[in-house]
Amino acid sequence: NGLNTLLLNAGTYSVTEDQENEDGYVTTYDNCTNITIANGETKTCTITNDDQQSYVIVDKSVEDNSAGGTAQPNDFNLTVNGNAALDGVKVPVNPGTHTVGETTLPGYQASSWGGDCSKDAQVTVALGETKTCTITNTAIAPKLTLKKYVVNNNSGENNSSDWILTAAPEDDAYATISGNGDYEDEG
């Protein structure tokens, strides 16, 4: 806090301050414009500089859940500096460098980190600044490998390619997958 008393001639004054070094501060003026001062009179102008909170936002998206995935953004246990965070919610932080993280779920891969985050999930925030880290995860399509074995140890002559293998979801008989697959003949 500073107090400056100026000796002036009678008249009308407006007071401002140089805001060159005020990034991250909000300035308010009280009784600082069109101040009329008569001889022998004292008036006070108050200038307040209030530092502003810094924030980090984790913007999480889940792409391509078409492979049967059901995960939503907050299922990934998002963090800022190891503390829990929610998708799209401002997390108050001090100015400086911060680490954003998530718990990767089985069946998903982090396909990109971006926004204001570096590739190592670091974000640097100045006083009063809000930075957003974007994390995109993609569901990994499940795979089912069908293998057919034919054992001809009792004079059988069929090959594994004589059978067509079919896989169908239990809830949709029309979504079948058929083919000869990978075969191994034994015997």
Image (cartoon, rainbow, N blue to C red):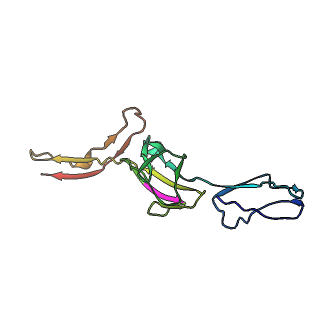
Q: Position of residue 27 (x, y in %)?
A: 70, 56
User: In the drawing, does residue 37 fall left or right of residue 131?
Assistant: right
Q: Residue at x 34, y 40 (%)?
A: 167
Q: Position of residue 57 (x, y in %)?
A: 54, 51
Which quadrant of the view contains residue 41? bottom right
> Front-most of 113 and 51?
51
Q: Residue at x 30, y 50 (%)?
A: 181
User: In the drawing, does residue 61 fall left or right of residue 108?
Assistant: right
Q: Position of residue 131 (x, y in %)?
A: 56, 57
> Front-most of 61 and 140?
61
> Front-most of 129 and 64?
129
Location of the N terminus (image quadrant): bottom right
Residue 41 lies in the magenta-colored region: no
Q: Position of residue 35 (x, y in %)?
A: 85, 55
Q: Residue furthest front?
A: 40
* Tally of marks: 0
Residue 112 lies in the magenta-colored region: yes
Dominant SS type (magenta): strand
> Front-most of 26 and 183?
26
User: In the drawing, does residue 187 fall left or right of residue 48?
Assistant: left
Which quadrant of the view contains residue 20? bottom right
The span shown in magenta is 110-115
Q: Residue at x 15, y 52 (%)?
A: 186
